[in-house]
């Protein structure tokens, strides 16, 4: 009996060993494949006039924002992540653009949830964060940018609209807004068109919702550490077709540059 049990155990062991070796080989091959395909390299993007131009426009009711993108070069996909505060809760949305042609959008991002045709909107949304990731077909690289935005309600009484970082503001006087709605203020990754001058700091965009046209206001840039050429800098604004240079007033004591403007737009500080 002992001999039969030994022989049986020996045969089972022989049958098991090839499968065990094959499993080990397969596991090793998978691990080697993972090593030979490393994760894409991530590069953090900083503002440049030649970067893609991406911006958000609020919907008239303030319950959604629309994302637009242009001048994205060889990138073929754009992943976005939008996070925002609704009262004390943190909410978010993610999505992907296929980048084709010269521009894409709008991609509507709901500030709430919808199910079976019924939507529940988040209330008290006043600020948030936008993260962009540009993907390339034949390049193992992801270019990433992140910026904050502020969402404010505006009407005929006007008021101040400003960036979340406190470095940019537009004082809108009473009677300067046609209609009412929302306005979104945000720093930009790139410009709608290259300015061709040395830019100081960041560019900011002021994007009103349809029906809330801002006809005039005073734009101000704050520099916590003013550059040496501070009093020689000028504010430039985009009128939809070209850059307009404004006669800029520096305030050395307050570290601000300001100028009256005729419309909400994209603004940037640069050497004249």
Image (cartoon, rainbow, N blue to C red):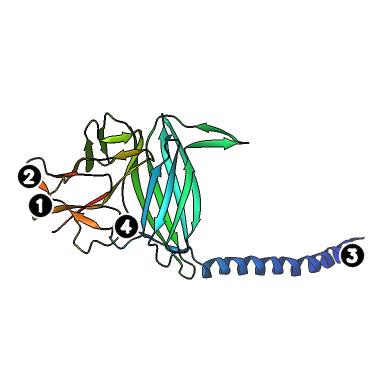
Mark 3 vs mark 2, foreground winner is 2
> Separation of disc 2 and disc 4 at Cα?
30 Å
In the picture of the structure, the residue carrying the numbered disc 3 is 3
Query: Would residue 65 appear left or right of 217 to someone viewing this image?
Result: right
- Within-10-Å neighbours for mark 2: few <14, some 14–19, many 20+: few
**Quadrant the N terminus occupies:** bottom right
2 or 1: tag closer to the N-terminus: 1
Q: Kindly report which numbered mark, 4 or 1, lies closer to the viewer in this rendering.
A: 4
Checking the image for residue 192, the label placed there is 4
Is the residue marked by circle 4 packed among few (<14), some (14-19), or many (20+) residues within 10 Å? many
Q: CA distance from mark 3 to mark 2?
A: 100 Å
The image position of residue 252, as x and y in percent, is 7, 44
Residue 51: x percent and y percent? 33, 61
Please tell me whether mark 3 sits on a helix, a strand or a loop: helix
* Nearer to the camera, 105 or 122: 105
| Residue at 28% over, 41% down | 163
Residue 71 drawn at (x, y percent): 37, 62
Comparing labels 1 and 3, the label whose residue is closer to the camera: 1
Which residue is under mark 2? 252
Which type of secondary structure does the marked residue at label 4 adopt?
A: loop
Q: Could you tell which of marks 3 and 2 lies nearer the N-terminus?
A: 3
Mark 1 and 3 residues: CB-CB less than 8 Å, in contact?
no
């Amino acid at each position: 009996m002992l001999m039969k049990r030994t022989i049986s155990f020996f045969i089972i062991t022989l049958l098991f060993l090839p499968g065990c070796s094959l499993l080990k080989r397969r596991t090793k091959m998978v691990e080697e494949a993972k090593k030979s395909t490393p994760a894409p390299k991530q590069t953090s993007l900083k503002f440049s006039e030649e970067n893609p131009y991406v911006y958000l426009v609020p919907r008239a009711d303030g319950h959604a924002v629309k994302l637009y993108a242009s001048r994205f070069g060889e990138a073929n996909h754009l992943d976005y992540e939008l996070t925002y505060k609704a009262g004390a809760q943190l909410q978010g949305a993610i999505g992907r653009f296929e980048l084709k042609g010269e521009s894409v959008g709008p991609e509507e991002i709901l500030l709430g949830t919808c199910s079976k045709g019924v939507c529940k909107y988040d209330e008290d949304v006043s600020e948030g964060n936008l993260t962009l990731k540009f993907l390339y077909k034949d390049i193992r690289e992801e270019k990433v940018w992140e910026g904050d935005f502020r969402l404010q309600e505006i009407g005929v009484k006007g008021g101040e609209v400003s960036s979340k970082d406190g470095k940019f503001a537009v004082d809108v006087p009473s009677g300067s807004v046609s209609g009412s709605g929302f306005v979104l203020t945000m720093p930009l990754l790139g410009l709608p068109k290259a300015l061709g001058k040395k830019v100081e700091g960041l560019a900011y965009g002021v994007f009103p919702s349809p029906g809330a046209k801002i006809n005039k206001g005073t734009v101000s840039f704050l520099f916590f550490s003013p550059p040496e050429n501070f009093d020689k800098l000028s504010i430039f604004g985009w009128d939809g077709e070209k850059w307009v240079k404004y006669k800029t007033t520096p305030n050395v004591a307050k570290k601000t540059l300001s100028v009256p403007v005729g419309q909400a737009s994209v603004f940037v500080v640069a050497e004249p």
